[in-house]
Image (spheres, rainbow, N blue to C red):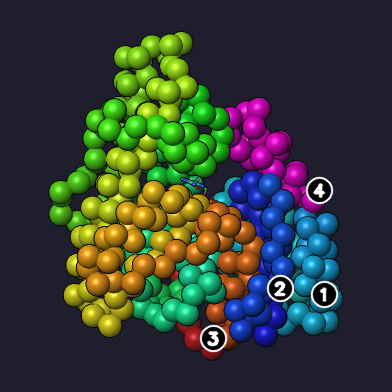
Amino acid sequence: MIVLGIETSCDETAAAVVDDDRTIWSNVVYSQLDEHIAFGGVVPEIAARAHLEVLDGVVRGAMSDAGVDLSDIDGIAATGGPGLIGGVIVGTMTAKAMAAAANKPYVAVNHLEGHALTARLTDDLNFPYLLLLVSGGHCQLLSVEGPGAYEQLGSTVDDAIGEAFDKSAKMIGLGFPGGPAIEAAAQSGDARRFHFPRPMKGRPGCDFSFSGLKTSVRQAILKTGPEALSERTAQDIAASFQAAVAETVADRCANAIIAFDEKYPEGKTLVAAGGVAANSVLRERLFALCALTGFRFVAPPPALCTDNAAMIAWAGIERLRLGLADDMDFAPRPRWPLEELRVEPA
Ligand code: KG4
Ligand code: ZN
């Protein structure tokens, strides 16, 4: 089975062709970064127009890279939400039109499910597994029993983790997007110089909190005097922030591992997914935690952690295998929590 995937939920316009034998035949990602950088964040209206302008070329590129045409494709999957609605509409309408014209099944993929199932595309991995989903808009721990079968163990009580990276980077003056900028700056920084809090650490449960950490970053900057923020200090704040995040996340994951292991003793796997899972300090920390607890740690390569369409095509494959195509009246949605996905096998 070969599926074309389309992703347009934020500021990446992406298309990919993926095989159900786990081969990624093509994976084209057009980043709109240059169009949003002057605004210090993604502007929804600009994003929607940019998707509209480039999506047909991106799809054509993915098909020609893969050496396929529409008749070779067994299904078309597009992100149907959650995300910036203008972009989601552009991707959904394109996928529906192609599916209708070629008489192929159409699948509306939940973007979070795309992240959640990526590890099964990149690694030989069975259900169930414990999932840490860390992206720009989300921070959750879930047990994954299958496509559509998610149970939340914990989530953030305030900011999403990627948001904490992006906002802190902005305060430090490292620009946008903040995650990669903080990771790069932190490489030359001293993680012990600033003693930022480890929110929620030591508390029972699997919830996260990042707003206090963000406030501590602001206070450190104010104390140093923002004008006087030298490159050295910026690097030290970045490194100290990143260390605090990694420690906090590892602490929450340690609790989740215990809870998950009790319910699914055969699982023994922690998967990290979403843009923030590209962070190498976080990955190392989670790898060490898993080594201690006898869990396997799986994280897709960084380029498949951040937004891409290979993950959407793959989620489409997983759904089509279960006979879960969608109707043409599927309505794109800005909000679509994973727990609301219900699989009704055909
Ligand atoms: O999954 P993603 O590409 O888009 C969403 O679905 O939100 O995640 C984007 C988020 C951004 O907040 C970005 O700063 C963060 O992932 N990110 C990182 C890294 N690369 C991307 N955060 C920390 N370290 C990174 N290397
Ligand atoms: Zn994402």
Residue at image position (64%, 46%) is 11
**Residue that mark 3 sits on:** 322
Indicate left or right for 324 with 211 as reference: right
Q: Which comes sooner in the sequence, label 3 or label 4?
A: 4
Question: Under tag 3, what secondary structure?
Answer: loop
At label 1, the amino acid type is: Gly
Residue at image position (22%, 68%) is 293
Q: Which mark is residue 25?
A: 2
At label 4, the amino acid type is: Glu
Ligand 1 closer than 8 Å to the CB at disc 1?
no
At label 3, the amino acid type is: Leu
Foreground residue, 249 or 188? Answer: 188
**Residue that mark 1 sits on:** 67
**Residue 78 seen by the camera:** no
Q: Which comes sooner in the sequence, label 4 or label 2?
A: 2
Foreground mark, 3 or 2, reads 2
Cα–Cα gap, marks 3 and 2: 22 Å
Cα–Cα gap, marks 1 and 3: 27 Å
Indicate left or right for 2 with 274 as reference: right
- Would residue 41 be counted in the magenta stretch? yes
**Residue that mark 4 sits on:** 53
